[in-house]
Amino acid sequence: MDFRPASDRSMSDAEAAAEAEQILRTAFRDDTPLPKIGSTPPVLQPETRIVPAWAAGTAVASIGIGAGITGAGCGVWLVLQGLAAVTLTSVLMVTLPLAALAALATAIGTAVQHARAVVTHTENHYTGPVTQHVQHTEQTARGFFGRITHRTR
């Protein structure tokens, strides 16, 4: 067999025909008819990822800290901009840090409340049959400080 690149050698008609026949013999064509809608039938792809609780908690905490730092930085910038021009707006800008602290206290209180609600006790031992009910939770945020109410159906 000649191992030179194709540009350095040329094939005779017989060699080309033999090569083409060998390629056609080893090729595969699926002649299964396709469905009328879509290109291929759907395939079930089950979700297998499992996120540990500590990873989810770390992600939520980092998002909260990032949002808090960004809000504090914006508040400082606004206060400094407001204090640069002594107007009614500058006086109102002085109160923004207080509003930011109130929002932060509300967020921390909500996080603590939700963290306490998630704690489960392992000393309970049940001997009866166990049934699982799927819960659908709806959240609505209302008010200036984003008070959230949960309704479980």
Image (cartoon, rainbow, N blue to C red):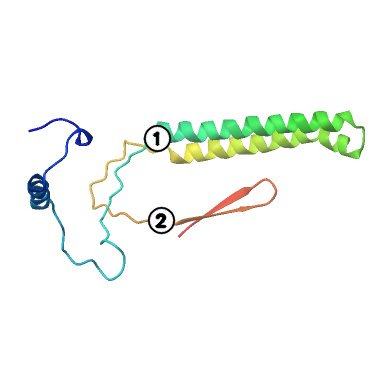
Q: Which picture quadrant has residue 65?
A: top right
Residue lying farthest right? 87
Horizontal and vertical percent position of residue 14: 7, 47
* The label number, if any, that marks residue 24 in the structure image: none
Residue that mark 2 sits on: 135
Horizontal and vertical percent position of residue 49: 32, 41
So how many labels did they put on this image? 2
Going by the numbered disc 2, the residue's amino acid type is Gln
Residue lying farthest bottom? 36
Residue that mark 1 sits on: 53
Going by the numbered disc 1, the residue's amino acid type is Ala
Q: Is residue 79 left or right of residue 101?
A: right
At x 47%, y 31%, the residue is 58
**Quarter occupied by the C terminus:** bottom left
Name the one closer to the observer, 42 or 67. 42
At x 28%, y 51%, the residue is 45
Front position among marks 1 and 2: 1
